[in-house]
Image (tube, helix red, strand yellow):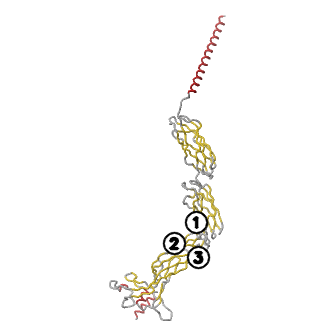
Amino acid sequence: MRYLRRLFLALLLLGLIVPVTATPALAAVEGSPDLEALIVGDDQFQVGTTGTLELVIQNKGTFDGRVTGADDQVLAYGYAMGGMMAAYPCTTAQNVTVSIESDSPVVEVVGGAAYVGALSRSAVTPEELLFDIRVYRYADVGTYELELNVSYEYIRDVDWLNPPDSLPLAPDPDAYNPATYQPQFDFTFEERTETIPVTVNVVGSYFEAVKTEVEHMRPGASGTVSLTLGNNGETAYDVTAEVIPSGNFVPVDRSSYLGTVNAGARVSTEFKVAVSDDAIAKTSPLTILVHYRDKQDVERTSAVTAGVEISPDIGFEIVETELDGTLAPGNDAELVLSVKNLSETDVNDAIARVNAIDPFSSTDDTAYMGDIPAGETRIARVKLSADDDAMPKTYGIDVEVKYRDGNGDSYTSDSMKATVEVVEKRGLPLESIILIVVAAIGVGGGGYLGWQAYRRRRRAASDMEEDAATV
């Protein structure tokens, strides 16, 4: 009797027996798990974002009743053999599964259920349970209640079929040799599903792109994005907006300071953004991160997606090629090019440049065309010479257009082909030869007659001088 009293006091001091103050006599042991949820992370979720809810489950289950037999012993404390539980007490929740639901249309739980396993009395889940919570941008700031659904089973009753002869059980599990003793139990399980309310707070501001305007946004170019942001939440302080490199865009001037943006207010800013060379002409997403501090001086971030229209690339076409003169080996001629602006964008200070390679050369391979409005054509004239050993045939010559866009940035177009024909070098036509011969004869004959007339005049003058001397 003295031994039982000491054992009872020891168990009481260890907290394994809950003292009962009720006056009636104690009944057989009864109990069950008692689970509660504790949020261990941040219970605040920002409007228009997805955050992670971190919580743990704690088992505060207790049992009532006096341990009077082997069955009560198991229900109160369980039975372990060789370090393994052969029977759980009634306060242990087994096969615990946790899920969260939301009745609010603006707060969504993303993801499925979490399996916990067994959770004994006074224990908490060894790791945090993580659930992604998405708060829609039109959610009102305030408190929202989520439903934490916990499913488990526990041993409501047990029949120990072959208990030891003496009770209570010795605290040392090795007192019963597993080689000679194997306990046998008949369990009665009960399944439960409990709904535990979990409260979260929706805070902060949500920014969205209200208006987007672009200039010179085309493949391979740098353009300007003018953005109007609207604050759909609480007043935000120390607001900055930053363009994030992604997709087709790389920021050139990436951030802006916007200061304090009141609830419901709009604020405008602009960024210079470079477009990738291989971008397709379409509306592409541009990501902007808005950093700010809320009224509690907590740093927050809101992601904004703006649709940016990428215009077709600027392109040119040589619609006509002419030679002012005949280009034969050893000769030169003026190459006349008609260059058309195929894009929907005006260009400025356009210059055509001819890449004169063998068998061609040029002392003036560029031609200034000036401004070329979208869809219009300008003329370029360059001087082209053919080498003496150039073969008579049709050649392709590379032509590029250097120009400036509306931002004043300089670009060079893709290379275009202009066709140039080198013809055979021929002798003079027969008619030309006859004319040259006749002219030569005429010139020669006229010179001979003139020379004879000159000699006659000289002779006559000499005779007159001799006659005068004789007299």
Judged from this view, the residue extending furthest toward the top is: 471
Q: CA distance from mark 3 to mark 1?
A: 22 Å
Q: Amino acid at mark 2?
A: Gly
Label of residue 303 in the image: 1
Q: Which one is closest to the eye, mark 3 or mark 1?
A: 3
Q: Nearer the viewer, residue 237 or 453?
A: 453
Circle 3 crowding by C-alpha within 10 Å: few under 14, some 14–19, many from 20: some
Residue at image location 64% in from the left, 7% down from the top: 466
**Nearest to N terminus: mark 3 or mark 1:** 3
The residue that disc 3 covers is: 144
Where disc 1 sits, the SS reads: strand
The residue that disc 2 covers is: 111
The quarter of the rendered structure image containing the N terminus is bottom left
Judged from this view, the residue extending furthest toward the left is: 180
Circle 1 crowding by C-alpha within 10 Å: few under 14, some 14–19, many from 20: some
Label of residue 423 in the image: none
Q: Amino acid at mark 3?
A: Tyr
Position of 124 compared to 237: left or right? left
Q: Is residue 14 above or below residue 458?
A: below
Which image quadrant is residue 179 in? bottom left
**Nearest to N terminus: mark 1 or mark 2:** 2
Q: CA distance from mark 2 to mark 3?
A: 18 Å
Q: Is residue 139 above or below residue 446?
A: below
Q: CA distance from mark 1 to mark 2?
A: 21 Å
The quarter of the rendered structure image containing the C terminus is top right
